[in-house]
Image (cartoon, grey):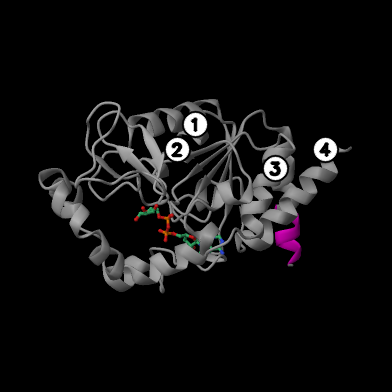
Amino acid sequence: MTDDLEQAIDEAAHLIVRARHVVALVGAGLSAESGVPTFRGPEGLWTKHGEPDLRDYERFAQDPKTWWEQRIERAGRYGELVRALETAQPNAGHYALRDLEGTGQLQHIITQNIDNLHQAAGSLAITEIHGNRTKLRCINCNRRWPLDGFPIEELPPHCPDCGGIVKGDTVMFGEPIPHDALEECVNQTRMCDCMLLVGTSAVVYPAAGFPVDVKTSGGTLIECNPNETPLTEISDVVLRAPAGAALPRVAGRVREMSVG
Ligand code: APR
């Protein structure tokens, strides 16, 4: 570990300990060390296969039955991602966020990841702005269910509460962010005075806008990413390292500072 990184870890821990409301904004990079491919960058899914079509959600809304009938074929198209997601386990970065929450030093996680690894690591205060691959969601009332055990007797399935159409909870390209998730993200961003940016390229909105709001309101930003991002220049501390290496060190330093 370089001296610069050691110093950055110390500075990050100081910002976290001094803050009142710490929020982690998480991207695919946190799950990279769990074997889940990221989207951009040299080996990224979109780099290799191209980004999905922004009209995907429009097509679903026009013909949800066909969308449901083609779900097996779609899984085949992203077989690399599906296989990785089915075997992925939380890594040291996920557990470090869980530990920071456990000691009261992290109040909320806003994750762009759909992999359910925060829950698997034991984190509790989570908003999944892009949904969760293990859940279904009614597009009318936003009620969600675990995928396992939901009775799919017809295609498309309908919500037992409101009769709305049910789809995978994962937010599709072109799909509006579910308003309940977005409201919580805005609420958390408003309360946040220190945002920990973990493994996100910070190019997809609205998520990429939350750190700018925190900074504009006088809060601090800590970036944890082996690579530069558009947020690097406004970050107060940069941990230029993989999350699985840096975050446990930050959590350990925070613990040391908290016991005095
Ligand atoms: N630790 C921390 N960061 C890492 C690691 C690691 N081990 N490995 C890679 N990264 C960083 C990369 O440098 C990059 O900045 O993670 C980031 C991943 O960027 P993206 O692949 O663009 O993922 P993300 O920012 O989550 O994308 C946002 O785009 O297509 C949508 O829905 C998709 O939620 C996703 C959103």
The residue that label 3 is drawn on is 100
Q: Residue 123's quadrant in the figure?
A: top right
Give the crowd class for mark 4: few <14, some 14-19, many >=20 residues within 10 Å. Answer: some
Closer to us: 177 or 115: 115
The residue that label 2 is drawn on is 210
Q: Compute the Cα span from label 2 to label 1.
A: 6 Å
Q: Residue at x 22, y 46 (%)?
A: 174
Q: Nearer the viewer, mark 3 or mark 1?
A: 3
Apparent side of residue 244 relative to residue 37 in the rendered image (left or right) = right
Q: Is residue 248 above or below residue 97?
A: below
In contact (CB < 8 Å): disc 1 and disc 4: no
Amino acid at dot 3: Leu
Q: Residue at x 38, y 29 (%)?
A: 180
The residue that label 1 is drawn on is 189
Q: Residue furthest left?
A: 62
Read off the magenta span. 2-8
The residue that label 4 is drawn on is 258
